[in-house]
Amino acid sequence: MPSAAFTAHTHDTAPAAAQPTIEGVRRKFGYLPAPVALMASSPQLLKGFLTINGIFEQCGLDQLEREVVVLTVATRNECHVCVAMHTGTLTGQGVDPVLIGALRSGTPLPEARLEALRLFTLAVLDHRGAVPDDVLRAFLAAGYHPGNALDVVLGVGTYTISTFANRLTDAPLDPQLADHAWPSSPAPAAG
């Protein structure tokens, strides 16, 4: 579907049900990210994604582990916006650039525990949840527990919503994220 089919809403043009949500996002980030402006056409999708993301942030994985899941999903689903945004998050947290680079390129991570998480996330995606026993055993042997395996499923579901919506709407990269553009990124949005 051509990206022209989707409207990048403002607070004034968004459906009434989306207006409080986009205003909250604008206050949090200091601007309205293009993906949110595009998702606002479906207030339910926008609110659903933000709600489930908030739940994912409370799961048993720590912040870095959640970002490993997110960037693994984002690179696999080729979402340049999510890769750039979450690269910015990790950079702002002072995460080792080697780890960030490996996540962005889909190559093995320098830390064995995080690499087990990345491989498990890929297996969840590739096998649609029916993860091979050896991959699950390796994940658990790395110090994770069965609840963490389900936390990964939550993260995969959350970021499948975001990455698919961003790709469907052809969400542009906001200028604020230009320093973290993924190699396949189109030019930043004007503004």
Image (cartoon, rainbow, N blue to C red):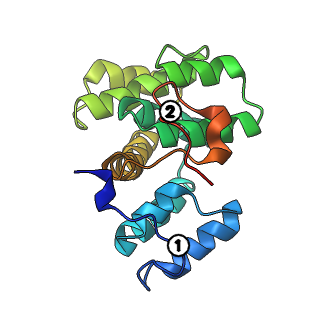
Residue identified by numbered label 2: 144
Q: Position of residue 57 (x, y in %)?
A: 56, 54
| Mark 1: few/some/many CA within 10 Å (<14, 14-19, 20+) | some
User: Label 1 is placed on what type of residue?
Assistant: Thr
Mark 2 and mark 1 lie on one chain; the one further toward the N terminus is: 1
Residue drawn at (58%, 32%), measured in percent from left and top? 181
Q: Residues within 10 Å of mark 2 (few under 14, many from 20)?
A: some
Query: Does residue 118 sit above or below 62 in this rendering?
Result: above
Residue 162 at x, y = what percent?
Answer: 41, 51
Which of 26 and 141 lies nearest the eye of the viewer? 26
Residue named by callout 1: 10
Left or right: 110 as drawn, with respect to 149: right
Q: What secondary structure is found at the residue carrying circle 2? A: loop
Give the side of residue 65 with respect to residue 166, left or right.
Answer: right
Disc 2 versus disc 1: nearer the observer: 1
The answer to whether residue 166 is left or right of residue 98 is left
Q: Position of residue 172 (x, y in %)?
A: 48, 47
Q: Residue 54 lies in what quarter of the image? A: bottom right
Q: Which mark is residue 154?
A: none
Q: Please give the name of the residue rendered at 60% of the width and 63% of the height, measured from the top-left corner.
A: 32
> Along the line of sight, which residue is nearer the eye, 4 or 92?
4
Where does the image place residue 69, in percent across and percent down from the top left?
48, 36
Q: What is the distance, in whole Å, between disc 2 and disc 1 at their CAs? A: 42 Å
